[in-house]
Image (cartoon, helix red, strand yellow):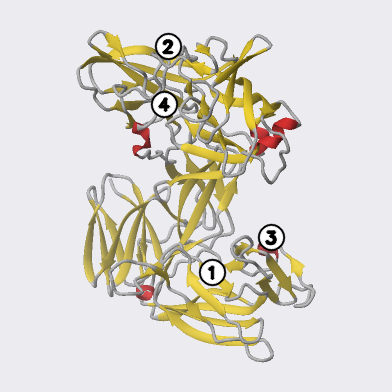
Amino acid sequence: MKKLYSKLLTLVTIGFYSLSVWAQDAPVIQNYSDYTGDSFVANWDKVSGADKYFLNVYTNGTNVQNVNETFGNINHSDGKIDQQSPNYPNGWEINVSENGSTDMVVYEGVNKIILDATDDYISTEQIIGTGVGKYIVNANLINAENITQENSSLFKIEIFDKAGILLSTGTIETLLFAQITEFNIFDGFGYTQANIGRIKISIEKGDGKIGDLMINSISYSCTEPSYILKDQATAENSYPVTNLDPEKEYYYYVAASVEGKTTDASNIIRVNEFLTPKALDATGTSENSFTANWERLPKAKGYIVQAYQYHTATQDSEKKILDDSFEKSTEGTMDDPISVTDPDLYTAVPGWSGKNILAANGMLGADNGRFPVSLSYLWTPTMNLSSNNGKYKIHIKARGTAGDYLSIYRIGYMIDSNGDGEPDALNIHKVTAFDENGYAEETWEMEDGAENMQLSIEENKLKRFFIDEITIIQESKAGEVTRIPLVPATISDGSQTSYTFTDLETNGNYGYEVTGMRYNDYEEEEYSETSNLITVQLIHSGIESSTTQNVKVIASENSINIVLSERALIQIFTANGQLVKTINGTSGENIVSIPAANIYIVKVGSKIFKVIAR
């Protein structure tokens, strides 16, 4: 998944080639392209007059680098920094001279920077290393007679990533430095950011606010980079980087050579893409099971394997897509319900989810909530409601607060509510209001059905509610094929590359696809794009005759000839269950071309044939 960077990329450049941090002639870095795991193309904008560029690519090293900046070499006199020759630390940006009365002082023979006005700030150089583990500001509170929490000025922290994008910001009273002199800013955030590129500290002094800061030093630690390319010269504004480890993340930056001088370097682009898994053909296919297979996905910590059943309607009919009266819920009452963490323990159909879920005898619901910090809702399992042009019926019985009502809508689906052609509102159905006894029951039709959809059930005032029963029905036309999602298999081992689905419908049609999972910088689950779809035909334990009840199947080298007495759906699979072709067969001769001589499984309606094309 590529991270898309905005024009902020043009605003921040790093200064380990010269003293200026935001030099105008530094290259503007662009996002990488053509990532394959073991290679990518680094990109940047051309610089006017540049005859070549120097590309640097690195990954995480193992050695720890400690930086302790005391600002001892800055030139100043009479409290003011020499603006003609400030001698700032290489790459750091210090702005304390435009506002306030004092830039620096010498205390006990050591230089100290003074933050005494709004917008006075100190910014680190671009941090090339990774894994910044601490960032300690050593400072004293000064000019703070009679300071209180109410009148204290504010110490502000801004953390940017390596591309110059703001990650986090926060403030705390400068009064803090009356109690301590060393402050690790990550203690203030409660967590350590990843991919840090620059950290900026400043002071905010509004009307009546007091308290200045005397900065003694700033120190941090990080992991030193391990360079793959160092100052790789090229005349182009892109460069292919190869022979990489797909399990690792990489970073790159670039500088330009203009008239024999080297510009500042660009910002840094992180290369940490999560590729798409590749699903492989099923193995171990039997009459009621198969094993799904896929290639190991670099960086994956686990997988979601989603299996589907393909149901072909033999005649016009109604099918219950969801039918649950929560009979597995046998404890609790509406007044004294049970708090639920695993809804599958209380439902006939697995896959329910939600927030503040409750269970009572024969019911599932959600507790009181509060907008926006503690929402309460139920989400149905994922369903395929794409048949019948998306039309389906819902019947619901529920309990709740008299006069209130339930809102039910398809998650993530928007409609055009004002006729301007732009989707702008949820397609909400308001269930008949709860009567004076707190009961509600209704049947209605929706027309927004789709594959892999869920419905959300919410109380309009976020009050407690319970569902007694819910049924979702959809009509199917004869010959219509519906893909029904099964309960997904969750795998927490990134090295696992197979999973066996068992207890399936005998001789059924199935399919599966795989999604990779890893953890992002905040230890949250992050998912890859979903793999290709593999189809599987479960196989009879015995081989049927090649002619059965007015169906005749004959194989040749390049085709299979299926003779039918009436119309029927024809599906052709390889011997390991991979779908090759699907056609709507007509009465008479149906000639289906095949890719190569092989063993094929031919399914005609509910009949299955095994043939050899020679």
Q: Position of residue 37 (x, y in %)?
A: 41, 29
Instruction: Determine whether, in the image, residue 310 is placed left or right of residue 136.
Output: left
Q: Is residue 134 visible?
A: no
- Which secondary structure, mark 3? loop
Residue to which mark 1 is pinned:
456
Depth order, front residue of 266/590: 266
What distance separates the C-alpha of mark 4 from that of mark 2? Answer: 28 Å
Residue to which mark 3 is pinned:
342
Depth order, front residue of 230/186: 186
Residue to which mark 2 is pinned:
85
Q: Position of residue 134 (x, y in %)?
A: 64, 26
Query: Which amino acid, by three-letter code, is at mark 3?
Result: Asp
Q: Earlier in the sequence, mark 4 or mark 2?
A: 2
Q: Residue at x 40, y 49 (%)?
A: 575
- Which secondary structure, mark 4? loop
Q: Nearer the viewer, mark 3 or mark 4?
A: 4
What distance separates the C-alpha of mark 1 from that of mark 4? Answer: 42 Å
Depth order, front residue of 448/504: 448
Residue 218, compared with residue 385, is above or below; it is above
Q: Position of residue 597 (x, y in %)?
A: 28, 44
Q: Is residue 113 visible?
A: yes
On-image quarter of the N terminus? top left
What distance separates the C-alpha of mark 3 from that of mark 4? Answer: 43 Å
Few, some or many residues within 10 Å of mark 2 (<14, 14–19, 20+)? few
Residue to which mark 4 is pinned:
268
- Which secondary structure, mark 1? strand
State the image quarter where residue 467 is shown: bottom right
Instruction: Determine whether, in the image, residue 364 is placed left or right of residue 474.
Output: right
